Image (cartoon, rainbow, N blue to C red):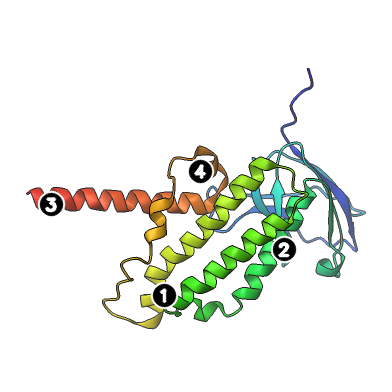
Amino acid sequence: MKAQIDYTLISGKITNKTDKEFTINSLLNTYPKVKIPIKVSATGTISDTIGLKEGKYYLYNEKNAIPIYIKPGHNLVINFDAENFKKTLSVSGKGSIICHYLSDKYRITKEKTKDKGALYKLEEKEFKKLFQAIKLAHTSLLESYKNISDSQFRGQEKRDINYAYLKKLIQHTSLHPYLTGKEGYKQSENFLNELDEVNYSIEEDYLLSNNYRFLLSVYFTMMRNKIMKKNQNLI
């Protein structure tokens, strides 16, 4: 019986290597935080086995970062010139196609949300329209990557695109009044109606999606508040 591989193999070459760290980091607002150095020889040869659990991470070299997908059994080959990271970076090997998809997804988001300071100042209708367009662009991108054969990833990623969209709507309800100075602001009654369609009992999504864990936290907070309010009315 073939032994199950419980690590991701990362290899490759850094040309013009510096003494700066080369690390894999967890996504922002992910707990527990992850930051592990990748072994690189004095000549720039990359060779390491990464025992992280399956999921999305960032690969950092100095100020440069790219999204990558770690999964036991994958074999990522990463090559770049440290003096020109963005133009020379290449990722190949088993599992690399998902990394390419995540990089394209990141680029789409960055292009559509350039003015981050003004995002949450948008009124509900304009804000929702913008992130519905981003959600559609991400979904279309995923569908265009026909060579992603991992059906589990495809299914979970499609749901995560929706979770990310819903997370933005929730964040708008608190950040909009704060950034615009609107006192007594209340979102429209139907603004968060799409939350009613979320299945809050998908274990796979809890393990793999930071966005889903955020929605769960909000959901249970809302449920707790409803129970507390009901109990107060009974007093």
> Can residue 213 be seen by looking at this rendering?
yes
Marks 1 and 4 sit apart, C-alpha to C-alpha, by 28 Å
Above or below residue 18? Residue 77 is above
Residue of label 3? 232
Image mark for residue 104: 2
Q: Residues within 10 Å of mark 2 (few under 14, many from 20)?
A: some
Q: Nearer the viewer, mark 3 or mark 1?
A: 1
**Residue type beneath disc 2:** Asp
Residue of label 1? 124
Of residues 14 and 131, the one drawn nearer to the viewer in this rendering: 131
Of residues 90 and 30, the one drawn nearer to the viewer in this rendering: 90
**Residue type beneath disc 1:** Glu
Tags 1 and 4 touching, CB below 8 Å: no
Label located before the other in sequence (3 or 4): 4
Of residues 38 and 174, the one drawn nearer to the viewer in this rendering: 174
Q: Nearer the viewer, mark 3 or mark 2?
A: 2
